[in-house]
Image (tube, rainbow, N blue to C red):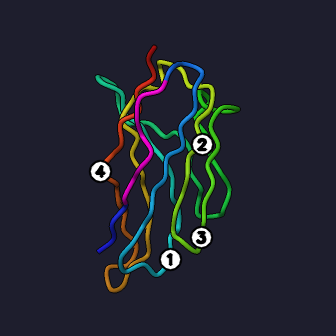
Amino acid sequence: QVQLVESGGGLVQPGGSLRLSCAASGSIFRINAMGWYRQAPGKQRELVAAFTSGGSTNYADSVKGRFTISRDNAKNTVYLQMNSLKPEDTAVYYCNADVRVPIAGTRDYWGQGTQVTVSS
């Protein structure tokens, strides 16, 4: 079993910054891909930023130039630095990982979500 634990959400004023963290733990052979999604009220969950299995990064157009994804492979942790936050960034942010685990092979895991609210 693999657990993804997120932290770092909260309330911030427009133009402010937040840093999200997601740590993966459990029976992990290898993390193939890992990243962040978000879901605003009444909207579908969407990709924010992620590392692909090839090691490259993908960003949603709406966050390019403002958000930066990074990782610490030794800690199985991925970070999302969010700068110049806008009210439309308000959402629950979810960590996602595609993980190779014993016996079961490759499985997809989600964190519990962390609320980010951008408001004055």
Sequence-first tag of 1 and 3: 1
Image coordinates for residue 53, horizontal then vertical, percent:
58, 64
Please state the extent of the stretch shown in magenta in the rendering: 5-12
Which residue: 55% across, 52% down? 79
Q: Which residue is mark 3?
A: 73
Callouts 1 and 4 close, C-beta under 8 Å: no
Which residue: 42% across, 66% down? 24
Is residue 91 found left or right of 55 in the rendered image? left
Callouts 1 and 3 close, C-beta under 8 Å: no
Callouts 1 and 2 close, C-beta under 8 Å: no
Image coordinates for residue 15, horizontal then vertical, percent:
60, 21
- Number of numbered callouts drawn: 4
How far apart marks 2 and 3 lie (CA) works out to 17 Å
Q: Which residue is mark 4?
A: 112
How far apart marks 1 and 4 lie (CA) works out to 21 Å
Which residue: 39% across, 72% down? 25
How far apart marks 1 and 3 lie (CA) works out to 10 Å
Q: Residue 30 shows which numbered tag?
A: 1
Q: Nearer the viewer, mark 1 or mark 4?
A: 4
The residue type indicated by label 1 comes to: Arg
Q: Which residue is mark 2?
A: 81
Sequence-first tag of 1 and 4: 1
Q: Nearer the viewer, residue 104 or 119?
A: 119
